[in-house]
Amino acid sequence: MCGIVGILGKNPVALDVVEALRRLEYRGYDSAGVATLEDGQLTRRRAEGKLRNLEQKLSREPLNGLIGIGHTRWATHGRPSVPNAHPHATDKLAVVHNGIIENFAEFRAELEAEGYRFESETDTEVVAHLVTREINRGLKPIEAVGAVLPRLRGAFALAFLFSGEEDLLIGARNGPPLAVGIGDGEMYLGSDAFALAPFTNMIAYLEDGDWAILHRNAVEFRDVTGKVVQRPAQMVAAGAALVDKGNHRHFMAKEIHEQPEVVTHTLTTYIDMVSASVRMPFKETLDWSQVERLSMSACGTAYLAGLTARYWFETLARVPCDIDVASEFRYREPPLAPRNGVAMFLSQSGETADTLASLRYAKSQNQTILSVVNVPTSTIARESHIVAPITAGPEIGVASTKAFTCKLVTLASIAIAAGRARGTISVAREQELVRELIMLPGLMTQALKTEVQIERLAHKLSKARDVLYLGRGTSYPLALEGALKLKEISYIHAEGYAAGELKHGPIALIDEDMPVIVVAPHDHLFEKTASNMHEVAARGGRIILITDEKGAAETTIPTEATIIMPTMAPTFSAMVYAIPVQLIAYHTALVMGKDVDQPRNLAKSVTVE
Ligand code: M6R
């Protein structure tokens, strides 16, 4: 993930910018850069590779400006290179960016037609030219940024520096985090408080959709509508730990909210944004065209990620595929493919005892072992032939959230690669699917906006004794995941069911006391799920529907609440619908006063049977 820093200082800032960037190195990067104002003129230094390369450049050609922005780039659009490194600049401004601007291609075409010249392959450079165009039309820098931000689609954080403006930086956030650090006559911007710890411990966080106008002695926050809002600064413990909660009460909340950003990181690992194709980050080759069977195994939420991915491996790659919970798989002695079998093991920690034992069994059966893990140095990773990292970053909350969605992105990418190798999807279909994946961070950012509604709903849910979750297709594993999340942190009994199974048993439970949470994007199965909702309504059940505009418009029965998700193509809806499902569990547990991050009886890493 890219890192952003900005400093309005009293002394030359370039080396401080680099120091702050060093504290963002943990996010991963492949080039870095800094821009300052020298006598009001924008001057940049950029270098490929590690920060020491940038430092060497700065020692040969120092920058003396008292105001600057800096960036560590994790390549998304365009390979790691100096021209693609940030800051991107015009004669009017320099900008650094974390995230994806989804609609950059249409802006680029429009700007090029007007004579704007591009120097890089990045999506970021369109932002530089869009704001420059507004300044060329006569707007002041603040007005120009205000005019451009509402036109950008996607999940992004931005920082701007303007030529001739010695006392102005602007930061903006739509998805990935951005913090403002308040010093004594100095002001800072950073991707997190940790980056700013050497300079200040007074931190104010931008809310989603906010932008901040920084001067040395004042900062003004504006919300998505442009209205001035208050974002109080808080004292962050000195030397803030690398994994802190940011401005969230719990790690789980932070991890839910950082999904647009970490999912972007996973996307950049598996996707070439420019050609809209998948690429595998591991050097070992796996010839999917020869694979006869895929056997997956995992526990808990990791298992449910695999259950979701089975739909993709079957429909996109037409690979025969089974999945079982690891505690059963390891003792079942299942016959595995005698030739060309792949066994896949999914695990956030990479240490789960049952998953590891299943891996060892599959290895004894001559399967190619592919692990999908968050901790690349874990035992499961070390014992695998091929490791697919999910790059979610440290997950601290016991209830797994971001590791679930990052696993799904990884698995979707592998399924697309398998489909291409097996000839079951065309290049055009691959591009279409990849473009759908690229939209995910933006869609997740929109999905997070349901939180206020979910907070209200949580008060009612907290009084329930039992909750039923229903879904079809990939919404079925998500129904199971919803029930698991609610159980583990609120201790309310919950069950997930395939909606079609309702009339085979669970319908007997329906009464006016039991909430039924229906996960139903408007896809090819929507009508079927709608019939199941009628069956629930006919028995006086309380329906909470998670759907999109179209699904809501076609739902004729009354619901207790309808949570509207952004409209999207159906294949990967589970990644976006996971967000309200996670928020429901989080807020219900919160209302009930439970220990959200460390629920009773549970461990983050289950290394015993
Ligand atoms: O580290 P792993 O992904 O192998 O862990 C598997 C399960 O223990 C884990 O997903 C557990 O179910 C979580 N608490 C779910 O939120």
Image (cartoon, rainbow, N blue to C red):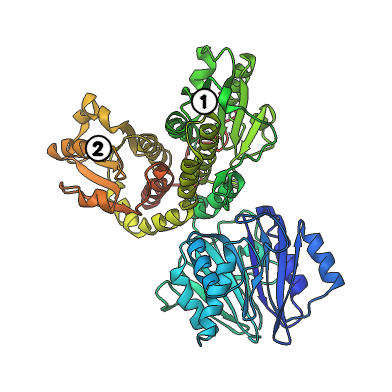
**Image coordinates for residue 215, horizontal then vertical, percent:** 60, 83
> In the rendered view, would you say 97 is above or below 292?
below
Q: Residue 432: in sight, yes or no?
A: yes
Which residue is at a point 82% across and 70% down the rendered structure image?
58
The answer to whether mark 1 is within 8 Å of ligand 1 is: no
Which labelled disc corresponds to residue 529? 2
**Image coordinates for residue 273, horizontal then vertical, percent:** 57, 52
Please state which of residues 397 and 442 is positioned toward the viewer in this rendering.
442
Determine whether the residue tagged by mark 2 lies in a helix, strand or loop.
helix
Q: Which residue is mark 1?
A: 296
Which residue is at a point 30% across and 56% down the rendered structure image?
456
Q: Amino acid at mark 2?
A: Thr
Label 2 CA crowd tier, 10 Å (few <14, some 14–19, many 20+): many
Q: Amino acid at mark 1?
A: Met
**Image coordinates for residue 234, horizontal then vertical, percent:** 55, 70
Q: Residue 204: in sight, yes or no?
A: no
Please state which of residues 544 and 417 is positioned toward the viewer in this rendering.
417
Could you tell me how many numbered marks the image carries? 2
> In the rendered view, would you say 91 is above or below 572?
below
- Spatial CA span between label 2 and label 1: 27 Å
> In the rendered view, would you say 569 is above or below 532?
below
Determine whether the residue tagged by mark 1 lies in a helix, strand or loop.
strand
From the image, which quarter does the C terminus lie in?
Answer: top right
Judged left or right of residue 390, residue 51 is: right
**Residue 118 placement: quadrant:** bottom right
From the image, which quarter does the N terminus lie in?
Answer: bottom right
Which residue is at a point 63% across and 56% down the rendered structure image?
78
Which labelled disc corresponds to residue 453? none
Q: Choose the circle earlier in sequence order: 2 or 1.
A: 1
Label 1 CA crowd tier, 10 Å (few <14, some 14–19, many 20+): many
